[in-house]
Image (tube, grey):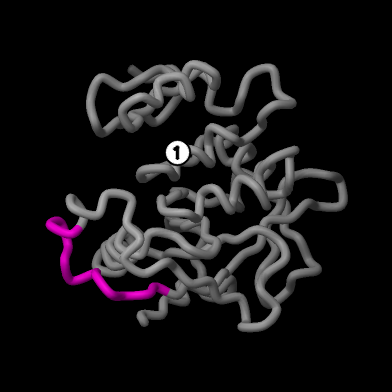
């Protein structure tokens, strides 16, 4: 087991970038562990964001799967040191809704006080990793404009940077569907696994010609 608590709300300096990893149970432990380790090596501020309600039995901790990698053979060669490890993450924030109905984040230590997301209070970089976790996020926290869906859409509107790994892209594809005529990521470009082109077409997302896509805005190439 490896435990990562990230920064608390009180520790954050909002004049600097704040990185956020959206979490639930059963994520890909290698993807999570390598991402968190890289953020720590760089001395970055990072937090974990979850959907409501937080697990009441363990103080807001979520755990990953063990060795249930999206691409076992490739990932095993990439970072064998992350085999046989369960990664635990503690949510700093819970997605919420402010009194006026706008997207908000509530601190784990003050869950009944939602903080509206604005240009001065927003997450700079948002990450979605793969494994079984994206499907849990979609089913429990995204569909039908639940609070997490609103939080994601608001950060897209404010120009935050998004990075997805593997099936983490599914979370963005599900955001705002099916109510919105145009999903929040319509016009963006993304790389997908083979035979998943139809997912992009439905969401009005362009397919990247390369395996890794870099794009900071819908208008970018």
Quadrant in the picture for residue 52: bottom right
37 on left or right of 64: left
x and y, in percent, of residue 190 in the image: 38, 27
Say whether residue 79 is magenta. Answer: yes
93 on left or right of 63: right
Specify the quadrant that holds the N terminus. Answer: bottom left
x and y, in percent, of residue 152 in the image: 60, 42
Residue at position x 53%, y 65% in the image: 25
Residue at position x 59%, y 28% in the image: 184
Task: Work out whether residue 156 or residue 81 is closer to the camera in this orientation and state it.
Answer: 81
Residue hosting label 1: 169
- Please determine whether, in this image, residue 72 is positioned above or below residue 36: above
Q: Which residues are magenta?
A: 76-87
Task: Work out whether residue 133 or residue 185 is closer to the camera in this orientation and state it.
Answer: 133
x and y, in percent, of residue 48 in the image: 51, 64
156 on left or right of 56: left
Residue at position x 36%, y 43% in the image: 166
Task: Work out whether residue 118 or residue 111 is closer to the camera in this orientation and state it.
Answer: 111
Say whether residue 117 is magenta. Answer: no
Specify the quadrant that holds the C terminus. Answer: top left
Quadrant in the picture for residue 78: bottom left
Q: Secondary structure at mark 1?
A: helix
- Please determine whether, in this image, residue 143 is positioned above or below residue 77: above
The furthest residue to the left: 77
């Amino acid at each position: 087991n490896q435990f990562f608590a990230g920064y608390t709300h009180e520790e954050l300096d909002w004049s600097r970038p704040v990185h956020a990893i959206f979490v639930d149970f059963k994520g890909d432990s290698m993807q999570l562990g390598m991402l968190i380790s890289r953020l720590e090596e760089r001395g970055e501020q990072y937090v974990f964001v979850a959907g409501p309600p937080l697990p009441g039995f363990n103080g807001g901790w979520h755990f990953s799967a063990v060795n249930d990698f999206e691409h076992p053979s490739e990932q095993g060669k990439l970072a064998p040191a992350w085999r046989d490890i369960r990664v635990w993450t503690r949510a700093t924030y819970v997605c919420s809704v402010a009194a006026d109905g706008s997207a908000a984040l509530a601190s784990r230590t003050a869950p009944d006080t939602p903080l509206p997301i604005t240009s001065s209070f927003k997450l700079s970089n948002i990450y979605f990793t793969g494994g079984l976790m994206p499907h849990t996020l979609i089913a429990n926290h995204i569909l039908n404009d639940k609070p997490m869906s609103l939080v994601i859409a608001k950060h897209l509107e404010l120009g935050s940077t998004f990075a997805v790994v593997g099936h983490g892209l599914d979370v963005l594809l599900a955001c705002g569907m099916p109510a919105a005529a145009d999903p929040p990521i319509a016009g963006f470009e993304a790389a997908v696994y083979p035979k998943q082109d139809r997912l992009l077409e439905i969401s009005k997302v362009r397919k990247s010609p390369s395996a890794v896509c870099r794009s900071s805005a819908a208008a970018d190439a």
